[in-house]
Amino acid sequence: MSKERYQTQTRENTTPLLSPVDRWPFSMKTVILIFLFSALSMDLFASETAEGAFWSWFKENENRIFNFKSNQEEVFDDISDNLNKYQDGLVFEISAAVNGKREFVVSADGISELFPSVESLVSSSPSLKRWSIVAFRPRMDNLSDLKLKYEGQELDPSKLWIYSRIDDDKFDLIVYHPEYSEERRSFIVSATYILLDMTLGEYDVTKGIRYIDHQKLPKNPDELGLRPFSELRKQFDSFKASRKKMANKLSKRTAGYGGLAPALTTSMN
């Protein structure tokens, strides 16, 4: 915080000499308020520039990042380092170039506590000609030929089955894997979460599904009422649409009561 020097004007000899307290142009209360305001301003400035520091670095290295394939490991390490300076735990993805433009995805890696940091960083992103800045892993348009490669292994969604239920207005899910074992559970869980993000979007997976489990695929999935993984998106979107429809009905009903029952609609968000 910069210091300001206050000086008294030169006075004629006939002017009585003032004490140091009398010469000070501000009361102690004013000085304290100025100090508190300055300290608060510094805190706000620091929080505002946390996002700005990352994007300043990004713009300075934009060409190197866009052409990351020439030195992928070093570029990705630099992105991770600078992203974690802003908020530890955030991750990123970079799309293939389409018509000279890439997507830069900022992800909370499914950790709901980090969602505000993702939203703040993305909302403060500058306009970049060759980039679209995206908050959270988005859905993929075409999943029919998808095979996920993760940690040197492959996860084929066409071999997965699911069981879903709606309980207490919440969506619960079990994913069944033909090659499930306790030894492979760590890989299966991590890879499946990425697959779910690609299917439904990171935001909906984290905020829209209450319970997710992973189990060994039984020999007779059809007889047990399981469905192919490919039907998950349709099931979940139907659930979301029904919740939205119900929320709209409750909202209209609440408006009819003069807004006396807001709790009914709050639980549906």
Image: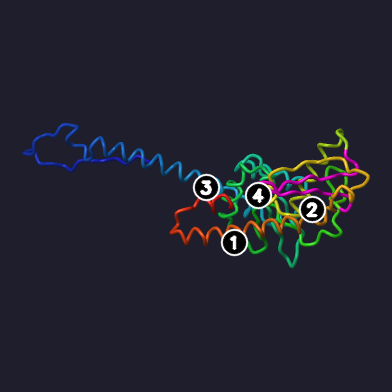
Residue in the picture at 58% in, 47% down: 116
Q: Is residue 125 magenta?
A: no
Q: Quadrant of residue 179?
A: top right
> Outermost residue, right direction?
219
Look at the image and give the residue range highlighted in magenta: 158-180
Q: Are marks 4 and 3 in contact (CB under 8 Å)?
A: no
Q: Position of residue 108 (x, y in %)?
A: 66, 45
Mark 4–mark 1 Cα distance, whole angstroms, equals 40 Å
Mark 1–mark 2 Cα distance, whole angstroms, equals 25 Å
Helix, strand or loop at disc 2? helix
Numbered disc in front, either 2 or 4 = 4
Q: Nearer the viewer, residue 62 or 10?
A: 62
Mark drawn on residue 49 = 3
Mark 3–mark 1 Cα distance, whole angstroms, equals 17 Å
- Residue of label 4: 169
Q: Is residue 8 visible?
A: yes
Numbered disc in front, either 4 or 1 = 4
Q: Position of residue 104 (x, y in %)?
A: 69, 55
- Residue of label 1: 127
Residue in the picture at 53% in, 59% down: 251
